[in-house]
Image (spheres, rainbow, N blue to C red):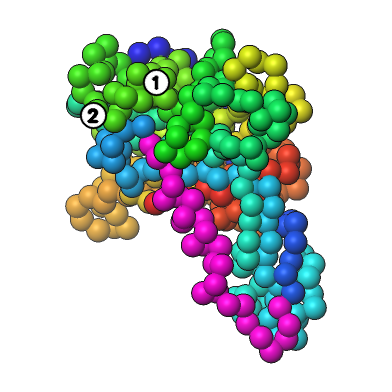
Amino acid sequence: MATQTVPVTAPAESPLPQIIHTDSVFQVPQGTSPDYDRGNSLVKLLDVMEGVELAAERQTYLSASLQYLFPFSFLELYGPAGSDSHILDVTQQDNKTDFQKQNVRDFRLTDTYLVRGWMSAGNYIGPFVRLSYRGGPDSVLSQRSGHKLGERIKVWVRVGNASVSSLLTVPYNPVTDRYEIELWASPDSDLRSKIDDKAKEALDRGELQVRNDLIQGTISDFERGKLEDQYTVFVAPNNTMHPVLPLRVECAWCDESERFWDSQDGRNYKYEFNMIVRGWEHFLGVGTSPNPHGGVGFLEYRNLMSNYGRYAGRNELGRTPSRGTSTPSVRRITAAAARTSWRSTTWTSTF
C-alpha cells in the first residue's frame, strides 16, 4: 500500500467554538412558540442522511464509524423567546435559560456532500471517503454547462496532503440522482473476490475506486498496544480516519469535457471532518498508572482532553483563546454547525 509520511512538528491547536453568523434569524412573536412538529430541520437533515447510498452493502461498513459532512449555503435560526424576542443579533443573545434561541429553523445544502468511515473487505479494515455531487438541472455545474452534463463528470481532489495527478471520472448514480465516487484504501490485489455484488457493480462502473495514494491507513494503526504512553496526534497522522486529527478534503468539479468548472472561482472547495469526538476510541493519550493516587494495583487511563503538560496550548478546555496565539491552518467544529471562511458551511454528523 502506497503511503506518504509527513512529519508532525507540533500538535494542531483546537480553537474554541465560534458564534454562528447566520444568513437569517426568524423572529418568534412574544407569547408564541415555534411549531417544531412541522418542517423540523432535524427531520429534514435525517431525510438527507437516509438518502445517502454507499457503494457496497450495509454490512461492509462499520456503521458506528460513519461520518457525514453536509455543507450548506443558507442557514436560518429561531430568535429568542419572551421579552427578548426583538433581539435578532446573535452576538447579543445571552439568556442562558432560553433554549429556543439559535435553534435551526431551516437550511439549504450546497451541491456537494462527503462521507467517511471504516470499510471491511475480507480480513482487512480500512478507511474510505465518498464524494457526491448533485445531479439534475439545479447544480452550479449543470447551469454552467447549459444543462448538458451527461453520464459522467470529473473531479480534482486532495485528501489530506495527497492529491490526484489527473482528474477522476465520476459516474452518474440514477438511484440517488447524483454523481458519486467512493475512494477506498485496500492492499488486496484480489479485492473483487472479497466484496459483495453491489460493490462489484460499483467497481465496474467506476463509482468505487481503490486509491491508496489518497486514502491512507488501516484500523490496526490504532490498536491499543501501539498507543501505550503515545501522544495520539503523532501516531499515523496521515490516516484518513485518525481519531483526533481533522481531515481536510479539497475538490473542484468539471464536466466530462473539462470545459465547465465548479471550483469556487478557482479557489476550490475545502471541507474538514473536524468535530471533536472523544471517548473510548478517541483520546489524546492512553496508558497504565501503577498505584493510582497512593492505592494498590494499576489504573488504565485515557486522557480525553487536557491543557497541561504535553497537551498545553490545545485550548480545548479554555473559555477564551490565549492572546498572541497564532491561528492554526485547520479549524475544528465543535457544534453541529459552524460557518467557514468561504461562505459554504458544514454540518458534521457522527452516528
Is the residue 136 above or below the residue 145 in the image? Answer: below
**Mark 2 and mark 1: span between their CA atoms?**
15 Å
Q: Check residue 78 for magenta coloring.
A: no
| Residue 44 lies in the magenta stretch | yes
Q: Which residues are magenta?
A: 28-54
Image position of 2 (left or right of 120): right
Kind of residue sitting beneath label 2: Asp
Q: Which mark is residue 2?
A: none
Front in this rendered view, residue 336 or 222: 336
Kindly identify the residue that appears in the image at 25 percent across and 58 percent down.
295
User: Within the image, what quadrant is residue 326 found in?
Assistant: top right
Mark 2: secondary structure: loop
Q: Residue furthest bottom?
A: 31
Q: Main secondary structure of the magenta part?
A: loop
Which residue is labeled 2 in the image? 196
Residue 71: percent from left, percent from top: 60, 44
- First in sequence, mark 2 or 1: give its number: 2
Q: Amino acid at mark 1?
A: Arg
Residue at screen point 63% across, 43% down: 110
In which quarter of the view is residue 157 placed? top right
Local secondary structure at mark 1: helix
Identify which residue is drawn at 49% across, 51% down.
Answer: 48
- At label 1, counting other C-alpha atoms closer than 10 Å, the crowd grade (few under 14, some 14-19, many 20 or more) is few
- Give percent across and percent down for residue 9: 56, 25
Residue that appears at 63% across and 66% down: 105
Is residue 180 at all visible to an observer of this figure? Answer: yes
Image x and y of residue 227, in percent: 33, 34
Q: Looking at the rendering, in which quadrant would you find the N terminus?
A: top left
Nearest the viewer among 327 and 73 is 73
Q: Which one is in front in this view, the residue at disc 2 or the one at disc 1?
A: 1
Circle 1 residue: 205
Question: Residue 162 at what x, y percent from top left?
Answer: 53, 18
